[in-house]
Structure formats: C-alpha cells, structure tokens
Amino acid sequence: MEKKSQQANEATDLSFEKAIAELTDIVDKVEQGEIPLEESLRQYEKGMTLIKHCRTVLQQAEQRIEKMSLQDDEPAEGSE
C-alpha cells in the first residue's frame, strides 16, 4: 500500500504535461511488449495513478474556468 501512496505523491508533483508524457511512454512500452509481465503490471498501476492525477488537474482547471466565466457574467457594480 505504501508503494501506491508513493506513486500518488510522485504523480501529484508532476505537471499535467509531464504526466501525459510519462503515460505515453508507459503505453508505448507496454504495447511494444518491451517489458516483462510483472513490470507491465507495475507500469499499469503507475499509469492509473497518473491518469487520476491528470483528471484532477483537468477538473481543477475546469472549475477555475467556470468561476471566471461566472465572474464575467456578473454586472459591474454601479452599472445598473
């Protein structure tokens, strides 16, 4: 369980772009059969952690955009 926690911490330290690059690398290696089964499983776990991190980053960005959109829609004070 500690390994998953460590992977999660490492993933959250990555930028969205770096996490996507790592995911791409993992997918390439697994698809090409360059790594043994046990390592493939470890890479799969790491990939799932990276995907979770990327989803979180995207959700946070979406929330920020929605918040900015709502602020733009509000009438300026004293303009009514």
Image (cartoon, helix red, strand yellow):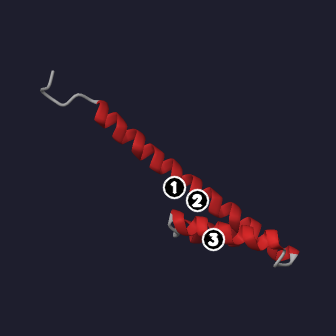
Eye-nearest disc, 3 or 1 = 3
What amino acid is found at the position of numbered circle 2 in the picture? Answer: His
What amino acid is found at the position of numbered circle 1 in the picture? Answer: Val
**Dot 3: what SS?**
helix
Circle 1 crowding by C-alpha within 10 Å: few under 14, some 14–19, many from 20: some
> How much space separates mark 2 and mark 3, taking CA atoms?
12 Å
Residue 69 x, y percent position in the rendering = 36, 37
Q: Which mark is residue 20?
A: none
> How much space separates mark 3 and mark 1, taking CA atoms?
15 Å
The answer to whether 63 is drawn above or below residue 75 in the figure is: below
Eye-nearest disc, 2 or 3 = 3
Q: Which mark is residue 57?
A: 1
Tell me the residue that label 3 is attached to.
22
Residue 54 x, y percent position in the rendering = 57, 58
Position of 10 compared to 24: left or right? left
**Dot 2: what SS?**
helix
Tell me the residue that label 2 is attached to.
53
Q: Which of 20 and 41 lies nearest the eye of the viewer?
A: 20
Residue drawn 23% across the image and 28% down it: 75
Marks 2 and 3 close (CB-CB < 8 Å): no
Residue 34 x, y percent position in the rendering = 82, 78
Q: Quarter holding the C terminus?
A: top left
The reply to whether residue 58 is visible in this rendering is yes
What amino acid is found at the position of numbered circle 3 in the picture? Answer: Glu
Q: Residue furthest top?
A: 80
Position of 80 compared to 47: left or right? left
Res 3 quadrant in image: bottom right
Residue drawn 53% across the image and 65% down it: 17
Marks 2 and 1 close (CB-CB < 8 Å): yes
Q: Which of 45 and 9 lies nearest the eye of the viewer?
A: 45
